[in-house]
Image: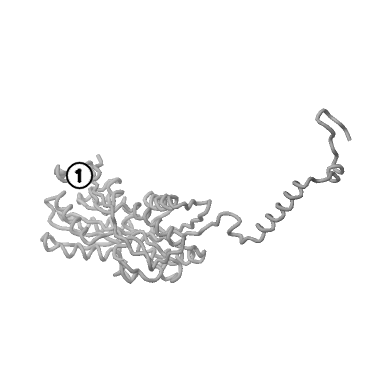
Amino acid sequence: MTEGRRGPRLNGAAIAARPRRRGDRMKRREFITVIGAVAAWPLGTRAQQMRRVGVFMDLAEGDPEGEARVAALKRGLQEFGWIEGRNLHVEHRWAAGQAARMKPLAVELVSLAPEVIVSSGASTLVALKEATRTIPLVFGQVADPVAAGFVDSIAHPGGNITGFINFEYAMGGKWLGLLKEIAPNIARVGVLRDPGSGMGMLGAIQAVMPSFALPLTITSGQDAVEFARVMAAFGSEPNGGFIVLPGPNTIRHRQAIIASAATHRLPSVYPYRFFVKEGGLISYGIVPSDSFRRAAAYVDAILKGAKPADLPVQAPTKFELVINLTTAKTLGLTISPMLLARADEVIE
């Protein structure tokens, strides 16, 4: 044993032999008790439990619009305290608008047993519905979920599916009205859509066509080549205008559609702002990222025990009108001050 200024220094044996004070013994007993109790806890309660959510998008990974929707969902979840990597694990699958990938990706995502899956739209939801009847499914954008057979009713969805509508019936007439207002000389209207999708939107347009007294041509395509071909055929005659309906393929190949509209001088109305941001003429529709932000509330509710059958399908609440003045000038169109005043955004 050696001594220093602060008293004797003890070796290991001396420390082991040193009498423990009552406080030391009490702390040791408390420590052992706590360790024993922790060991008996279920694994999920030893640390903050990690919850599992799936996200199935019909767009391609890396597509700016698809990434914006997922980001909006995650921001919404953060507002409810769900932080990815802390108490939330998110599995993503991206179908890139390819019908052949929908079913296998849906089966793969379901096999991971997430507690709820957020579906981007009708095409992904069809595949998910076939893959599971038990995992809760929340769709971000479906035009008519009742007609599509996804839910029993808007107020009482039933089953394991609920979500958010991206269309209201009156939008069909608004698209036609905007096309006629921005391009008064059009004498023909074409509708461009994905095959098998947008039937409710198409029906809304067809219902109001008699009041516009214009012939209607319905076209569809699945890739950039097909879209360019049908738009070239329609544009071979003068005074035509297009309405582009939302769908995984029209969104995925939007650059080809926008370029074809410019090449064939076809004034076109689009469903979302990002079409116009990338060179389209005019858009009127919902803000897609807002639907996914709102979907976070349903994910939160389900993670806390709510059933999709008890969560009513919600209608869109936020719409925006966007005009691209540069494209209008290129097409030789003059935008009226009244239309400009109604726009939520004017891109120059």
- What amino acid type should be assigned to the residue bearing mark 1? Ala
Residue linked to disc 1 = 328
For mark 1, give the secondary structure.
helix
Between 203 and 22, the one nearer to me in the picture: 22
Q: Residue furthest right?
A: 1
Give the position of the N terminus as an image quadrant.
top right
Q: Position of residue 252 (x, y in %)?
A: 35, 55
Mark 1, Cα crowd under 10 Å, few <14 / some 14-19 / many 20+, is many
- Image-quadrant location for residue 325: top left
Q: Position of residue 47 (x, y in %)?
A: 59, 54
Left or right of 287 on screen, residue 242: left
Q: Position of residue 339 (x, y in %)?
A: 16, 46
User: How many badges with numbers are in the image?
Assistant: 1
Residue name at image x 12 percent, y 60 percent: 214
Whether 11 is drawn above or below 183: the answer is above
Left or right of 322 on screen, residue 309: right
- Image-quadrant location for residue 161: bottom left
Q: Position of residue 324 (x, y in %)?
A: 24, 44
The color scheme shown is one colour
Between 54 and 101, the one nearer to me in the picture: 54
Give the position of the C terminus as an image quadrant.
top left
Between 117 and 95, the one nearer to me in the picture: 117
Residue name at image x 29 percent, y 60 percent: 315
